[in-house]
Image (cartoon, rainbow, N blue to C red):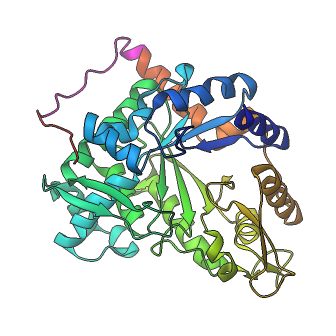
Amino acid sequence: MALLAEAEALYGMGCRYYHYHARNPQTHEQSTSNDIYQQISRPLQRRCKEMLISFGASRNGPEVRESIRRFGEWERISQSSLPLHLGGAHFVTVQAAVELQLMCEVERRYGDLRPDFIDGAEFAKIVADYRPSDRLTTTSLETYSTSNGADYGRTSPLIQFEVYRSAIRARQRLGLFHEVEWVQFPRSYAMTRYAVEHPQIRLGGSGQLNVTLLFGFSPRLPFPKSYAEFKRVVDAARKLEYDLADPGVKKRHVTVTVGAAVLPEQAGQHVAPLDVGVRLGRTACALRRLATYASQPDSGVDVLRFGMEDTPYAVSTGGGPAGGLRLADNCELAEIVIGEMAANGARVETDHDVIFDRMGLNWVRRNLFFEQRQRPLGRPDEALEDMALQSV
């Protein structure tokens, strides 16, 4: 299979994190089929034994909406409950749909969500007091995306809350890791803070959380114009290591992944001089700028994400102000990223033990092993209220 051959080539170049969304091989639409995820994950684990695998939660599209209509909202993120040895993933991104529903309702009730507000006691009170409503609404995200990329169907905050909670519990039971994607700052920050602090969710409760920042995905998280703007979002994610009520005690290890989700038609808007690094002043495209930012010693970045889902093209800055644009595959994009990293004195880490320590995964596993010894039959779930987790 071409996808696996490419994954092996990337592995040989030093790639140790592989993120993908399931698509129907006949229609090429996004799919909720766990079989598709598993068909890639199983051989990928055999061929690239030290690769960390990340599943994208199925977001939207006609086939996803039909699956949800037939089987319920859990279909959107059911891949989060697949054991790793049966074709699951180390990470699953689960936040987009719930973030849109809950934080929009929070904004309607409590007002604008600013980063300084999210960091304060008032937001802690919202976490304690807010109860998601069961009001069904049609949800869409203002986004730079392909056709129907912003359509999340008709659902309610309560449905999304219960599904999100179930996904986090599933990851905990499997001894797997936690990951969220941010696509609309500061709303994404607010949702993650809410999930970390909420006693019925406890995102990252095992002591680890990876936050993926998709710069350029939406007007609410635009591609940064400067390194300072980039750092402002990365630093916000890092604050999640501490609870609002106990800011001096580290409660979880947060790692940060960054990606440049810039559409081809917007590529020229982000060709600009570098404002940091050894190539200061040189004109660079979004991907090269992102790689330069992530390579700085104080960047706070752990994983640099690139690929066809985000920027499926290469830009030649010699072709005029907008640059020359051409299709590029993942291996060529890897070469671009590695070149920018090397120029800035950064290197690709491939040592499995070092990666697990840096990502906080070894500590989590030790913690989970202790939990399993204490409760060999598992911790019983709290009884869920009798409610249909069904979107329209």
Vertical side of 129 occupied by 83: above or below: above
Position of 102 with respect to 320 (left or right) is left
Residue 181 is left or right of residue 392, and the answer is right
- Residue 382 belongs to the span the image colors magenta: yes
* Closer to us: 168 or 284: 284
Chief SS of the magenta region: loop
Is 337 or 148 nearer to us in this picture? 148
46 up-or-down from 40: above or below: above
Furthest residue toward top: 376
Residue at the spot x=55%, y=38% of the render? 26
Q: Residue at x 35, y 53 (%)?
A: 97
Name the quadrant of the N terminus: top right
Is residue 54 highlighted in magenta?
A: no
Is residue 246 visible from the viewing direction of this image?
no
Quadrant of res 290: bottom right
In the image, residue 313 lies at what x, y percent? Answer: 73, 63
Quarter-of-image position of residue 189: bottom left
Q: State the image coordinates of residue 165 (x, y, percent, origin top left).
A: 30, 40
Looking at the image, is 282 positioned above or below residue 110? below
36 vs 358, left or right, is left
The residue positioned 43% from the left and 14% from the top of the image is: 373
